[in-house]
Image: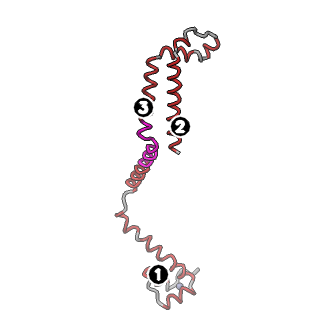
Amino acid sequence: MNTDCVFEPNVIDAATNDAWTQSLRAHIASCESCAAAAEVAPWMDAFSGINEREHILPDPAVLWLKARLLQSNAAVERASLPITRLQIAAYLIIAACWAALLTWKSAALQVWINRFSPTHVILGATGPDATASLSLTVLFAVIVLSSATVGVAMHTILAEE
Ligand SMILES: [Zn+2]
């Protein structure tokens, strides 16, 4: 490829400013070098103009920070969106009920839970007062609270999808 064509500067100028003359058009049809130059000239011109615009572009660090902030905002929004006020209230009520139940019947629950512990099963020592101390009401409350906890959790998981 001949890169030293005498018309090349004229061709680049014509391509950049879109100022083609009949003779230059005729020339690029026959000159491979000038045809290539004409093709890249507008792009090269735009590329050279980037330096002039540089001062109006924001600092890359600012751009990066902004992107990170927007990203985290979007993530927080996405994460908080499925959790409604109702769900938060449900969680709080369930947590309060668990706390109340555990405080109220902590000793009885401890005995009841111990019945399922490996040590207790191996020893085969079924405390005679275990079932008695844990009333049917407490057992019912545990079942209801467990179901409610699972229900709310499932609702949250399903809502996220
Ligand atoms: Zn040429």
Residue 92 badge: 3
* Residue 87 shown in magenta: yes
Q: Earlier in the sequence, mark 2 or mark 1?
A: 1
Q: Main secondary structure of the magenta part?
A: helix
Specify the amino acid type for callout 1.
Ala
Marks 2/1: CA distance? Answer: 65 Å
Classify mark 3: residues with Cα within 10 Å, few (<14), some (14-19) or many (20+): few
Residue that appears at 50% across and 31% down: 149
Q: Which of marks 3 and 2 is nearer the N terminus?
A: 3
Image position, residue 141 (x, y; %): 50, 23
Which residues make up the magenta segment? Answer: 72-88
Marks 1/3: CA distance? Answer: 71 Å
Judging from the image, what secondary structure is the residue with disc 2 in? Answer: helix
Residue 151 badge: none
Residue that appears at 47% across and 89% down: 21
Picture layout, residue 127 above or below residue 138: above
The residue pinned by badge 1 equals 15
The answer to which image quadrant residue 124 occupies is: top right
Image position, residue 85 (x, y; %): 41, 39
The residue pinned by badge 2 equals 154
